[in-house]
Structures are given as C-alpha cells and as structure tokens.
Image (cartoon, rainbow, N blue to C red):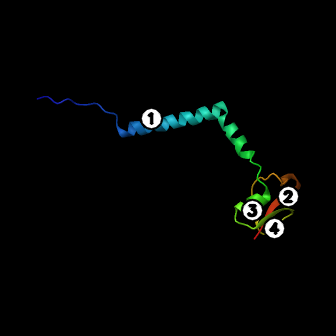
Amino acid sequence: MKRKRAQSISINTIIIAAMGLVVLVVLFAVFTGRFKLFNEGISSTGLTCKESCKLSKYSDGTVNTGDNCANKLGGTFSDVNQQKSQICCCTT
C-alpha cells in the first residue's frame, strides 16, 4: 500500500506572511495620509488644564506662569500658551 505525502505550509510561513501583511497595511496608511487624519482627531480634543488635572486624580488645576509649581502636568492643553511660558499646575 502506498502512502500519499501531503504538502502543507509550515506555521513559520503563515506567521511571516501575516507579519508581512501587517507591515504592508501600515505602510499603506503612512503613504496615503491616513495617520494624519488620526493625529488631527487626537489633537482636536481640546483638553483643558483643569480637566487634565481632574483626570490625573488631582483636585484642581490652574494655569501658571513660571516654575513655582510642585505638581506640573506635561502636555498640550487648549488653555495653556506655551509661548508665554505658561504651565499647567495641579493642586492636591
């Protein structure tokens, strides 16, 4: 009795093909400008200093000028002007 030998794709080949497909999708998104749309959606949320401090478990937040703040919160906020050296200062 003769045995038939089946040809099959190895697991390594399937994994490499899946990784290649993911890389192609990311490159397609980068070169067609889809990440720009995503970035615009993220940056247009307009979080204020006070809202960010409350989300970070502080009681309140104020916009200060100078470095006399113990709890500085980093980031870009709609009510903080970084060109005027303003910072977001959270209070406990």
Foreground of the two, 65 or 61:
61
Question: Which of the two discs, 1 and 2, labels the residue nearer the N terminus?
Answer: 1
Q: Nearer the viewer, mark 3 or mark 2?
A: 3
Q: Which residue is mark 3?
A: 53
Image quarter hosting the N terminus: top left
**Upstream in sequence: badge 4 or badge 2:** 4
Q: CA distance from mark 4 to mark 2?
A: 11 Å
Badge 4: how crowded within 10 Å, few (<14), some, or many (20+)? some
Q: Earlier in the sequence, mark 4 or mark 3?
A: 3
Question: Mark 3 and mark 2: span between their CA atoms?
Answer: 15 Å
Q: Position of residue 8 (x, y in %)?
A: 31, 33
Marks 1 and 2, how far apart at CA: 50 Å
CB atoms at circles 1 and 4 under 8 Å apart? no
Task: Indicate which disc residue 86 carries.
Answer: 2
Q: CA distance from mark 3 to mark 1?
A: 45 Å
Q: Secondary structure at mark 2?
A: strand
Residue hosting label 1: 17
28 or 37, which is in the foreground? Answer: 37
CA separation, marks 4 and 3? 13 Å
Q: From this viewpoint, which residue is outermost toward the bottom?
A: 92
Q: Residues within 10 Å of mark 1 (few under 14, many from 20)?
A: few
Query: What residue is disc 4 on?
Result: 69
Please give the name of the residue rendered at 77% of the width and 49% of the height, measured from the top-left corner: 46
Q: Position of residue 26 (x, y in %)?
A: 58, 36
For the point 49% across and 35% down, the residue is 20
Q: Amino acid at mark 1?
A: Ala
Looking at the image, residue 38 sits to the left or right of residue 85; the answer is: left
Which structural element holds mark 1? helix
